[in-house]
Amino acid sequence: MELQTKALHAGYEKDSQGTMAVPIYMTTAYEFRDSEHAANLFSLKELGNIYTRLNNPTTDVFEKRFAELEGGEAAIATSSGMSATFFAIANSAEAGDNIVCAKQLYGGSVTLMSHTLKRFGIEARFFDVQNPESIEVLIDNKTKVIFFESLTNPSIDVADIEVITNIANKHGILSIVDNTVATPIICRPFEHGADICVHSASKYTTGQGLAIGGILVERKGLVEKLKANPRYAHFNEPDASYHGLVYVDVPLPPFTLRTRLSLLRDIGAVSSPFNSWLFIQGLEHLSLRMREHSNNALQLAGFLESHPKVLKVNYPGLKSNSNYENGQKYFTNGLCSGLLSFEVASLQEAKKIVDATELYSLVVNIGDSKSIITHPASTTHQQLSQEELIACGVPSGLIRISCGLESVNDLITDMKQALEK
Ligand code: PLP
């Protein structure tokens, strides 16, 4: 089945009512048939619903559908993109370990990696996504993760996924890709060797800025990489918190299984059934939207490139862009998503343009059907130091656009008047 078809049908079997739309199961808990059934569910002899912090039938459809779209084996929905990223790292590394991360990341991920995880004893070492060869010197026997975004926010670089995942595989390290901006419609990291994908579902998945959520997807056959791998003893040794379960010995995808049984159980950042339902609605037309977002962004980027006030346009769909080749290699049909950024001379100039637009909303979000304008240096990336800002590709005159689904003629007209005001 092709992606458009999976987006509409995967993971859902109609119940006895024959409901076309996936029902929203708003419930905290589920009645067990009897005490043996309850014990079997807890010991994994039988699979089924226990408590909505662990699983839920609506969320289950969202997870199965997303896993199919990504070409993975299983998925875990979470309460936000940040919790999906946190779970992916916390499931791989512990105090005393280190992770190797691209420095071109979403601002919240930068602070998670460099400040919050540090307090948990996990050290982040950063590499330049434009120079993946620099990764190898950062690796030692305590390295547990290589983390990067397929299409980076807000610097709009396209990662050379195969170069990075080849290095990860050579050292038996898990590669985790944040595929939020590209979405599985445009980029399929598992086909290029990645192990785990994480997403903020708050962006293109919901598609209309309706809800916060995240999802973590595990590739098929990951168990072979984890089995007897000295970096991941916690998957190979009995888990004392789950009556001695050895994750690689269970015939279930081990990474998502451990995330569910251990991290969702104890940390609890779970997707609400209602939000999972919203994400299911979003997935139904994700492929149509990604095509339109990409077409609009390409035309707007072309206009910006020709404007004298604009110093630089970052959009991998432009032939002049240094990421063009990677975009052609890794993205489906050359679609490059709706995110672009451009640079003007100064912070003051950038703020003036942002304030002069009428059609673009000044919002710290991306992936909405409505176009969004952001000045990262004063908002999403405000907590970063000057050095961190430069390192993650956010000069103070940078303006980010999340190109929506309005008529591109209107978007260009409004941007022109704002630039020339
Ligand atoms: N990853 C990327 C690339 C993002 O852009 C964002 C948010 O903007 C996140 C992760 C975090 O997602 P959330 O806001 O759903 O926690």
Image (cartoon, helix red, strand yellow):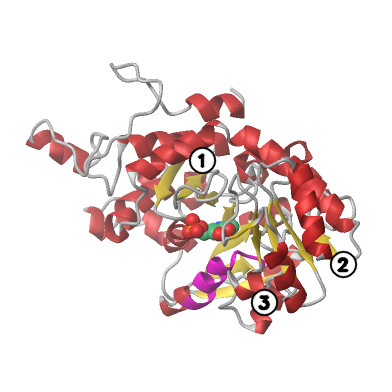
Q: For the residue marked with disc 2, what is the amino acid?
A: Lys
Chief SS of the magenta region: helix
- Residue 373 lies left or right of residue 225; in this view the side is right
Instruction: Give the secondary structure at mark 2.
Output: loop
292 vs 359: above or below: above
Instruction: Give the secondary structure at mark 1.
Output: loop
- Residue 30 lies left or right of residue 124; in this view the side is left
* Mark 2 CB within 8 Å of ligand 1: no
Which residue position is annotated with label 3?
A: 389
Span shown in magenta:
104-115
Residue at (41, 60) in percent of width and height = 233
Q: Quadrant of the N terminus?
A: top right
Q: Residue furthest bottom?
A: 386
Q: Position of residue 187 (x, y in %)?
A: 66, 43
Q: Position of residue 79 (x, y in %)?
A: 39, 53
Q: Quadrant of residue 38?
A: top left
Q: For the residue marked with disc 1, what is the amino acid?
A: Gly
Q: Earlier in the sequence, mark 2 or mark 3?
A: 2
Which of discs 2 and 1 lies nearer the camera? The answer is 2
Which residue position is annotated with label 1?
A: 221
Q: Which mark is residue 176?
A: none
Q: CA distance from mark 3 to mark 1?
A: 38 Å
